[in-house]
Image (cartoon, coloured by chain):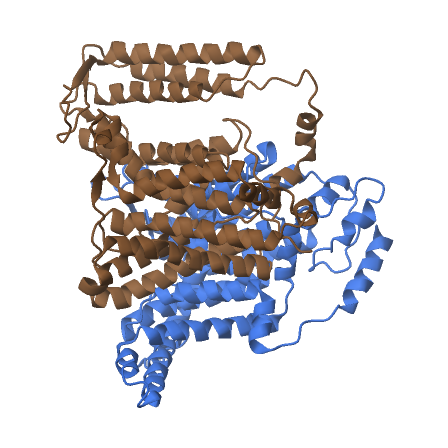
């Protein structure tokens, strides 16, 4: 099939493609969900920033509300209201300062190494988020809502772990082979959902949710069998990953940051090339923009679904390998933590673009790494980070709400859109 | 995100044409055949002979005491498997003659295979399998699934996908625990739970109808939000003063006079908490009202073809809003199960994915209240079976047992159990 040149490769074509290209056959509008998704993905950066601000403010309210000093001051609120505000300010600011110090730069640290350790921790934590988020982003842009990153991470970790524990190879073979196994494991697990979607129309949301649960029990089971369990141990824990299969450390022994971060960067570049520069990526985006039009244009929609899921699962599998072979160096049932679900919010925040996902992953990695420091220093439970993450995504998904809160004008009809649709007709 | 039904015009076209000789689907008889043969070989033929299985039927509270039943394991399993095989053959014949078989066939088939499995699992074991307790526990564990599935069904019938069931259950569990602890009345908790669910539902409505955000995104994010807020309040407020905020009293078990004395059925159905009796009523009411009332017709019209509904004067988004908030309240009520009905204090993420299984139960029950009830009971049964067999000592690892409902669901949505068709306009926002 010959792919017509796309004027703006970063923005998926508007619905006009389908109708302009296919005037003779029945004119089906794209499923509404695709249009909505595209609008979310194309709203401005200002909304992103304001959404983060709004989320921080609302989480601050929650932090203040649960603070003991604030509650004590609230009892005499009407005689001395400033006391309440002062207590709330000190509770919220100390929590956020601790969050920053735990995530980026520890100003209290005595040595430079200790001071920048939080930043490297943030980078380490963000590796699985970035990798899995990149995979999910591909799915979103192809119109597939893949909730299964959790299961795919687990399967990737299982496969990588098996290769790491059971093969005895030199490092130049062992690590690549373990990574390859992770790619295969995650890809296969996601491929089930893609295959069923293509073959029977089974909804990928339900199938991936079910596969997540199956993966959780599968790893719990395998950790009680010789397949993964440490010989001689009665606990569900694997042997330690041998040195030859570990991701090498990037900054020496005093930091946990490992080569998985480079893998994440390479993966982001790969996804940029795949979605922006390759034919297969063009097909993915065409299917996401309007499957009916894509089918008419000769793209196999079903094959695209399978490939999208395979690629997404492979990236999530790599995220699993980063945990086993890099960060944890041992396989437990909790290997995926909540990375799979956080990655959904990462991909949404990053607007499913590689660069956006990369920075969104860093941001959420920072929230997570800083959250632990915040919990340790100020006693503010890390759960508030979940609230922040979900609020950020909710606000970003609803730009009119953010604009209403900050009294921003609604964006007028864009000139660019009219110009683009005319070029489209020419191209078609 | 694309809805599968609109994606595949090629697949639906032959159905719509409804030619006199549409191809026969052999999936169902093949499935029955495979499972009955598996059951015959695994549970009947392979195990050693000469062992016995025991089932107890009566509970200590029963008026009529029935002695435990002991059966020879091998021959009983073979007999049950042969009945199942007979049903498979019957299904084959009926399918060949293009006749439809009723719901009774899969039901009896399922009972036969499960009983064959139980006979095999208990073979040669000292401890008997408490049949009544097994069923009683199944119904108990199915409560949140039933409420969750009904919630999903109410929302999806009107065209709003509710992935936030998990969050609604959790919110219901949280508020039920707090209110019940403060008022020291379990019933007050039962009233508070639906309010918490409805609040989450209101957020779902706000973002999915007013701001036209993808409903699945909103659902997923609301789940995270509710987990975050409840866990945060749990770690701060509830932990500081657990005696005051987090020690909910347990709902009492109410015996219905006479009915609760019927052997097996009595203890299972009529010796439960008030939440279960409410569940019976809600299932019955929804089954009648969704399919037999003006309200239900409008609800379904809005979910199937909102434009047509709008044309005849039904307020599409208002109907969707009401049914979503009502549905969310139902899920919230189900959340009360985890705290006041189970008699447990609130814990972080204590719903443990039950909301997603409820979603699966709704699909397995084909967006139908009674079907959802049946599917939820199935999941509850497999959940409780795992507990009971854990006590008896099972030859199968518990994780594999726990996996089963999810595998079954995947088979179900992949169409092996029969074609599942969601409401045509679910997930599609209606903008005039």
Q: Nearer the viewer, residue B162 or A368?
A: B162
Residue A285: % across, % down = 67, 50
Residue A353: % across, % down = 60, 59
Residue A220 at least partly seen: no
Residue A53: % across, % down = 50, 75
Q: Nearer the viewer, residue A117 or A411?
A: A411
* Location of the N terminus of chain A (image quadrant): top right
Q: Nearer the viewer, residue A254 or A157?
A: A157
- Asked if residue B165 lies left or right of residue A46, the reply is left
- Asked if residue B95 lies left or right of residue A257, the reply is right
Residue B37 at least partly seen: yes
Q: Residue at x 27, y 30 (%)?
A: B135
Q: Which chain is the one coloured brown?
A: B
Q: Quadrant of residue B233?
A: bottom left
Q: Quadrant of residue B45?
A: top left
What is the count of numbered marks?
Answer: 0
- Point out the residue furthest to the right here: A426
Q: Is residue A60 above or below residue B340?
A: below
Q: Is residue A352 above or below residue B93?
A: below
- Asked if residue B204 lies left or right of residue B339, the reply is right
Residue B175: % across, % down = 32, 59
Q: Residue at x 47, y 45 (%)?
A: B152
Q: Residue at x 41, y 71 (%)?
A: A59
Q: Which chain is the one coloured blue?
A: A
């Amino acid at each position: 099939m010959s792919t017509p040149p796309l004027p703006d490769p970063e923005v998926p074509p508007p619905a006009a493609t389908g109708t302009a290209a296919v005037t003779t056959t029945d004119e089906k509008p794209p499923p509404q969900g695709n249009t909505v998704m595209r609008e979310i993905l194309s709203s401005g950066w200002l909304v992103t920033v304001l959404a983060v601000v709004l989320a921080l403010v609302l989480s601050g309210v929650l932090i203040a509300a649960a603070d003991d000093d604030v509650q004590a001051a609230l009892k005499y609120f009407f005689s001395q209201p400033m006391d309440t505000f002062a207590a709330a300010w000190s509770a919220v600011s100390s929590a956020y300062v601790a969050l920053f110090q735990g995530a980026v730069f520890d100003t209290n640290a005595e040595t430079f190494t200790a001071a920048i350790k939080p930043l490297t921790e943030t980078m380490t934590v963000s590796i699985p988020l970035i990798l899995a988020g990149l995979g999910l982003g591909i799915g979103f842009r192809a119109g597939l809502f893949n909730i299964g990153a959790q299961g795919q991470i687990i399967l990737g970790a299982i496969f990588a772990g098996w290769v790491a524990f059971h093969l005895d190879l030199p490092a130049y073979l062992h690590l690549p082979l373990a990574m390859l196994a992770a790619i295969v494991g995650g890809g296969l697990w996601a491929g089930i959902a893609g295959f069923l979607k293509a073959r029977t129309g089974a909804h990928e949301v339900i199938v991936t949710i079910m596969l997540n649960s199956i993966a959780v029990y599968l790893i719990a089971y395998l950790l009680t069998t010789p397949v993964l369990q440490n010989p001689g141990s009665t606990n569900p824990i694997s042997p330690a990953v041998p040195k030859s299969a570990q991701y090498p450390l990037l900054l020496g022994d005093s930091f946990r940051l490992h080569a998985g971060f480079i893998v994440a960067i390479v993966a982001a570049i790969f996804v940029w090339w795949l979605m922006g520069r390759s034919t297969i990526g063009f097909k993915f985006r065409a299917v996401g923009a309007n499957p009916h039009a894509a089918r008419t244009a000769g793209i196999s929609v079903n094959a695209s679904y399978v490939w999208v899921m395979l690629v997404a699962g492979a990236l999530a599998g790599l995220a699993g390998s980063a945990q086993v072979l890099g960060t944890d160096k041992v396989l437990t049932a909790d290997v995926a933590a909540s990375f799979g679900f956080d990655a959904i919010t990462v991909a949404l925040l990053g607007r499913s673009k590689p660069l956006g996902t990369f920075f969104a992953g860093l941001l959420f990695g920072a929230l997570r790494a800083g959250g632990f420091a915040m919990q340790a220093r100020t006693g503010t439970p890390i759960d508030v980070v979940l609230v922040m993450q979900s609020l950020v995504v909710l606000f970003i998904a609803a730009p009119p709400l953010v604009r209403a809160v900050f009294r921003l004008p609604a964006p007028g009809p864009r000139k660019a859109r009219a110009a683009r649709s005319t070029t489209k007709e020419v191209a078609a | 995100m694309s809805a599968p039904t609109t994606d595949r015009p090629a697949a639906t076209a032959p159905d719509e044409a409804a030619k006199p000789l549409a191809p026969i689907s052999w999936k169902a008889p093949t499935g029955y055949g495979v499972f009955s043969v598996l059951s015959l070989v695994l549970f009947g033929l392979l195990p050693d002979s000469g062992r016995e299985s025991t089932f107890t039927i009566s509970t200590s509270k029963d008026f009529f005491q029935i002695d435990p039943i002991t059966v020879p394991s091998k021959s009983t399993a073979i007999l049950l498997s042969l009945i199942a095989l007979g049903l498979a053959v019957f299904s084959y014949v009926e399918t060949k003659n293009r006749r439809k078989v009723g719901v009774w066939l899969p039901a009896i088939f399922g009972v036969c295979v499960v009983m064959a499995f139980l006979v095999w699992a208990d073979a040669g074991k000292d401890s008997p399998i408490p049949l009544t307790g097994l069923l009683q526990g199944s119904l108990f564990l199915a409560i949140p699934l039933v409420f969750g599935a009904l919630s999903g069904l109410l929302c999806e019938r009107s065209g709003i996908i509710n992935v936030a069931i998990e969050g609604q259950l959790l919110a219901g569990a949280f508020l039920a625990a707090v209110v019940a602890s403060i008022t020291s009345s379990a019933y007050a908790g039962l009233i508070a739970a639906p309010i918490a669910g409805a609040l989450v539902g209101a957020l779902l409505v706000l973002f999915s109808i007013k701001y036209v955000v993808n409903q699945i995104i909103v659902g997923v994010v609301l789940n995270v939000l509710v987990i975050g807020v409840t866990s945060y309040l749990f770690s701060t407020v509830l932990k500081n003063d657990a005696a005051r905020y987090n020690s909910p009293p347990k709902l009492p078990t109410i015996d219905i006079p006479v009915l609760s004395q019927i052997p097996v059925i009595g203890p299972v159905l009529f010796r439960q908490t008030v939440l279960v009796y409410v569940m019976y009523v809600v299932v019955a009411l929804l089954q009648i009202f969704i399919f037999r009332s003006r309200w239900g017709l409008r609800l379904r019209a809005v979910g199937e073809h909102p434009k047509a509904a709008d044309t005849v004067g039904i307020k599409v988004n208002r109907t969707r809003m009401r049914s979503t908030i009502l549905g969310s309240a139902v899920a919230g009520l189900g959340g009360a199960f985890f705290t006041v009905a189970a008699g447990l204090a609130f814990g972080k993420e204590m719903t443990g994915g039950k909301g997603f299984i409820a979603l699966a139960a709704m699909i397995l029950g084909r967006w139908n209240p009674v079907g959802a009830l049946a599917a939820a009971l199935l999941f509850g049964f497999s959940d409780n079976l795992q507990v009971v067999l854990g006590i008896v000592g099972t030859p199968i690892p518990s994780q594999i047992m726990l996996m089963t409902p999810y595998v079954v669901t995947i088979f179900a949505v992949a169409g092996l159990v029969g074609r599942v068709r969601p409401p045509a306009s679910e997930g599609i926002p209606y903008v005039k």
